[in-house]
Amino acid sequence: MENEYLFRRTPKKVKLIHTENREICTKIPVPESMEIIERSLKNEPWSMNHQLYAVWDHATDFHVYDKWGNKWIDLSSGIFVTNTGHGNPEMVEALEKMIQKPMLNSYYYFLEERSLLTEQLAKMAPEGMDKVFLLTTGAETTECALKLCRLHGIKQNKKKLGMIAFHGAFHGKTLGAQTMAGKPSSWKWIGNLDPCIYHLPCPTDPFEDMDQIYDEDKGRKMFERDIKELEASGVDLDTIAGAIFEPYQGWAALFYPIGYIKALREFLTEKGALLVSDEVQAGFGRTGKLFGYEYYGVDVDIICCGKAISGALPLSAVLSSAEILDVDGSLNSTHGGSPLPCASALANLKYLEEHHLVEESKRKEEILLNKFNELKEKFPDRVKTIHGMGMAFAAVVVKPGTKELDVELVDRIIERAFEKGVMSIRTMTGTIKVGPPLTISDEALKEAMDVLIESMEEIVEEKSCNG
């Protein structure tokens, strides 16, 4: 990637760390790990070279370990997968039972674990969503949602193919998913963009505080403006089949104005169109709600799930009604609902409920918010805003006196925190983003955030000294 900051690959002597939650006892990166890293870089594409230079050996709960004695607090949850903690013992036990049977692959023949999982998901889903289609990746679910919206639409009008999405959104890396994602830079490889996918501006300003989302009247007026502009561009609004949104845009944990989403829902209902909530990152307690869309006080027609649904293994799901999901007779998948992911997901969802982790996520929100506000108070010229809910938060970091996102500064901060025993998310967008397992202890969460604050203090001071 052009102008990308490259994490240091030369092992460096760092301060040794020994706390209950962190252990750094070697140079960083570990000299002995470089053979593994170099082998990976030789055989994998350059896109696999964006992360911190740690070779994971094992992970438990909210800790990641290498095999040379180092231990990190994980603020990434493997990018929001391990909501119930890494290596959850109940999930491990469920997987061991499947392996010992052995039952490793079943195509889409009937499987007890799959039947139990779809039953459980239907129970967790809102009333009326009585069907579940299992897949493997988040992108598959958003592609499926696009297809379902259009199949539902053309039953009313053969021209009803329009799909509304948002600038700045992310829905996966396949053709339809990337077309719906509102990032023109990701469209370069697509020869002919789908003419029936329409992008509205992201209604949340990342450079304004979160209070903006609660002004319902303003949110409604913003939607009215955007939909009028879409119509003025030549789009027949009666051909809209659906709209897709994320409860929050991942790069900066940007939640949408509540009034905007309510107005969108009302518009879609009027047009006989469907609303899709892409919960791949937000679902299963991440936001302090089971599903993130619940914050908006609206009903949705399709829910796309992934990541934390299994807590570990590749699994995703589309939740909807029989009226919507039974329209397409081609919905099946080689690995969708495979035995091991289903077993993992069943144990994962049981643990989520029995340990009240959705409620825990909401409770710990205050800890994260207080720590991020502390960061903002220390660096008012650099930390422009804080966004987030539950256990998904981000600080928008800018170059002083501007609205230019300081991508390199953030990369250096998370690299320094890594050297101190804290592993966080690299967004490559100039945001300090965290999303630890919902199981993290209050003490470890505070400790990890203090390390991020300390790391920013050091990097900013070094930057000042170096001009």
Image (cartoon, rainbow, N blue to C red):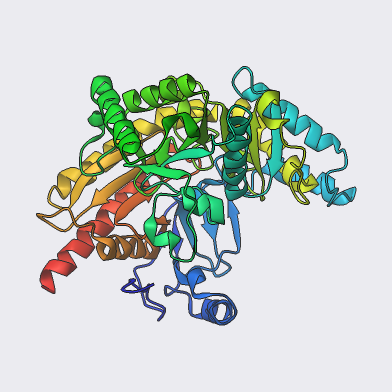
Residue lying at 50% horizontally and 21% vertically, measured from the top left: 299
**Which residue lies most toward the top here?**
127
Q: Image quadrant for the N terminus?
A: bottom left
Q: Is residue 398 above or below residue 346?
A: below
Is 265 in front, or is 448? 265
- Quarter-of-image position of residue 374: top left
Residue lying at 21% horizontally and 44% vertically, measured from the top left: 207
Q: Is residue 250 visible?
A: yes
Is 410 in front, or is 241? 241
Q: Image quadrant for the C terminus?
A: bottom left
Residue lying at 74% horizontally and 41% vertically, measured from the top left: 331
**Which residue lies most toward the right here?**
101
Q: Is residue 391 visible?
A: no
Residue 428, percent from left and from top: 36, 60
Residue 168, percent from left and from top: 36, 48
**Does residue 332 appear left or right of residue 306 in this picture?**
right
Residue lying at 79% horizontally and 37% vertically, measured from the top left: 114
